[in-house]
Amino acid sequence: MKVNTGSVFSVSAPDQGGAISPQVTMRSMKQSMVIVGGGIGGLATALAAARAGAAVQLLEQAQAFAEVGAGIQLGPNVVRVLQQWGLEPALRRVAAFPDRLEVRSALTAQVLGILPLGERAVAHYGAPYATVARADLHSLLLQATRAHADVDLQLHAVLASVQQDGQQVQLQTTQGASISTPLLVGADGLWSRVRQHLLPDAQPRATGHLAFRAMVKQSVLPALVRSHVVTAWLGPKFHAVQYPVRGGEWLNVVVIVQGHTAGDPTSWDHSANATEIRARLAYAQAPLLDLIHAIDDWRLWALYDRPPMASASEQAQGRIALLGDAAHPMRPYLAQGAGMAMEDAQQLVASLQTHAAHATDVPAALAHYAQARWQRNARVQARAIRNGQIFHLRGPMRMGRDASLKLLGEKLLDMPWLYGYGV
């Protein structure tokens, strides 16, 4: 398939009086943008661009659109993005909206700190704090994207090569398709092929952490371990997080431990032995230990990331932009991986609308996007790494952490710099 290489953005059509409006839009010839990757970041970009008037071609290597993983926490900064895309009603049909975050000691079950969410989040940041099954968020974005006629979603499209010059980006797929586009977005995740063309740097690094994940109906759990709040359990060399999804009918649970696993690192999903996780958390107290023993089916992920971004060139170069995990994979200890991808998508389209009235302007628009995003993404990456260290403290350092949480609680847990972004 050939992608038209005409202007990406053009002035709007003549008004009824025959004059040309100077308003810059993303209305253009067909296929003005190609996106590689059909996960949350890729679909978010396709939706944002289509809503702004662009025509989009999205290439997904899988045989079907699907999402792995269990749950996602969406801070108010991310929910505001979904609100701006008109998706809050759809989100409310599938998400839960916890009224607080509790931090507890896994060794004593004592509450160390509480951050009110619910109405407080709305009052402070203009949107609620939501928790949602990853597959439900992906499906929500997919349905919204499919509603736009100018989005061409292609499955089993595996990228083979990428070349760019001053005028266009040329793609080849393993299926033999040749595609030319004035703008390429790499949203193809941690092991991004687009990134390897743009930044032929080292492979993602193993964090030394393993994530055991499960999602289970609350109705099958003992009443004492059911929950409708976000709870983070902190233990020596491990931590666990639980929160409701699907309107509170399901509970998502993730336990992060230190260690390594064999197998293909590019594969997220491995079966896990319930006996292993129970042994690793043997010193935890109820109700966390009771919850772990109530769940038999676990999946296992070895966690990988990259160092925090060091420059705007890691976000975009020329006519190629990176987005989400392709640009800045991060550890899940700030619950912002998917959120940063959606913020990226929103900013990318805003930069294009403001700075690219024609295909020749694309590099300048992507430079603006990169400058607007890389430092925030780097800060979130660095803070997530730091949180992981704090969560797993032992000995006197653990005692100091717990005392600080008891004393300062809400002040330590609230993050206006994160949740108030763009307000």
Image (cartoon, grey):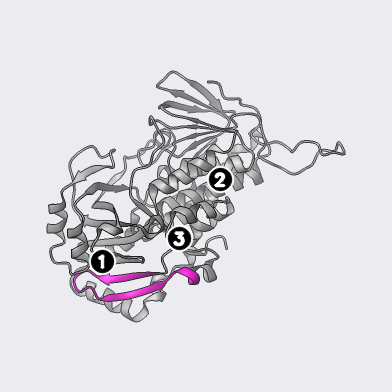
Which residue is outermost to the top? 176
Amino acid type, label 3? Gly
Q: Compute the Cα span from label 1 to label 3.
A: 28 Å
Name the front one of labels 2 and 3: 3
Amino acid type, label 1? Ala
Determine whether label 2 and label 3 are within 8 Å by CB: no
> Tag 2, which secondary structure?
helix
- Can you identify the residue that label 1 sits on? 223
Q: In this view, does 86 lie to the left or right of 223?
A: right
- Can you identify the residue that label 2 sits on? 348
Q: Compute the Cα span from label 2 to label 1.
A: 45 Å
Q: In this view, does 69 lie to the left or right of 6?
A: left
Membership of 57 in magenta stretch: no
Going from N to C along the chain, the mark reached first, 2 or 3, is 3
Amino acid type, label 2? Leu
**For the residue carrying disc 2, how many other residues have a C-alpha within 10 Å: few (<14), some (14-19), or many (20+)?**
many
Q: Which residue is drawn at 17% across and 67% down?
A: 284
Q: Compute the Cα span from label 2 to label 3.
A: 20 Å
Could you say where residue 333 lies in the image, as x and y percent from the top left?
Answer: 34, 59
Going from N to C along the chain, the mark reached first, 2 or 1, is 1
Which residue is outermost to the bottom? 407
Q: What stretch is highlighted in magenta?
A: 100-120
Q: Which mark is residue 75?
A: 3
Could you say where residue 206 lies in the image, as x and y percent from the top left?
Answer: 26, 47
Q: Which residue is drawn at 64% across and 34% down?
A: 8
Name the front one of labels 2 and 1: 1
Q: Which residue is drawn at 64% across and 37% down?
A: 361
